[in-house]
Image (cartoon, rainbow, N blue to C red):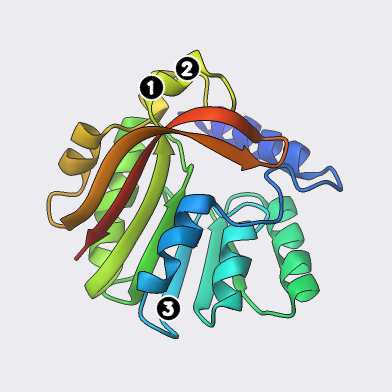
Amino acid sequence: MNDQQDLAKKKGWDERYGNHEYIFGKEPNDFLKSVAEQIPAGGKVLCLADGEGRNGVYLAGLGYEVTSVDQSPVGLKKANALATERGVSITTITADLTEYDLGTTCWDAVVSIFFHIPEAPRNQVYERVTKALKPGGLLILESYTPDQLKFRTGGPPVAELMMTTDIAHRTFPDLTFEHCEELERDVIEGIGHTGRAAVLQVIARR
């Protein structure tokens, strides 16, 4: 992806988040909500591509120290507004995740919810995710699978941006998988994700 494509993609997300409405809603992802308390109490959590902040704000409400990274300053402005509304605090960083330094052995958990980019940069980001986790740290991930194309209820329009169990195991060779499953479920997350969906859910530990 060249610089012009990067700029167009960023502008596209800024425009989507520019509406007063939270396009993916204000409530956390259901999978994240069901497993969040596996993260050590008070731990440091990095939320990838956290957009308008629904997941990071939820985790902050559970007492975690949350950093939300996204390429859209418009989305993160809404994330901070949501945090204020909920009476919590998060750290927001505007950055391209393909270039952002995630650190080394510094996160108790990394959360990746519907973060879809092409395979090559995705592999680079997730290689750095593995190194950024503390020993024993958790990766919590939900992604659409290629079967999502038959539902068209959210997510990218091409299969190459999605993941499967096989792709997950190849992508995280140094993590121990505690859960890795492809399934169909109802995803009701604002106007952006609404309806039956095909997803991959992962919990993996360094």
- Quadrant containing the C terminus in the rendered view: bottom left
The kind of residue on which mark 2 rests is Leu
Q: Earlier in the sequence, mark 2 or mark 3?
A: 3
Measure how far apart labels 2 and 3 are at the Cα level: 35 Å
Residue receiving disc 3: 44
Q: Is residue 48 above or below residue 115?
A: below
What secondary structure is found at the residue carrying circle 1?
Answer: helix
Q: Which amino acid type is marked by label 3?
A: Lys
In this rendering, would 179 be left or right of 84?
Answer: left
User: Residue at left 23%, top 64%?
Assistant: 131
- The residue lying at 56 percent from left, 38 percent from top is 187
What residue occupies the far right of the structure in this picture? 20
Residue 102 visible, this angle: no
Q: Quadrant of residue 46?
A: bottom left
Q: Which residue is painted at 33% across and 77% down in the image? A: 106
**Marks 1 and 3 in Cβ contact (< 8 Å):** no
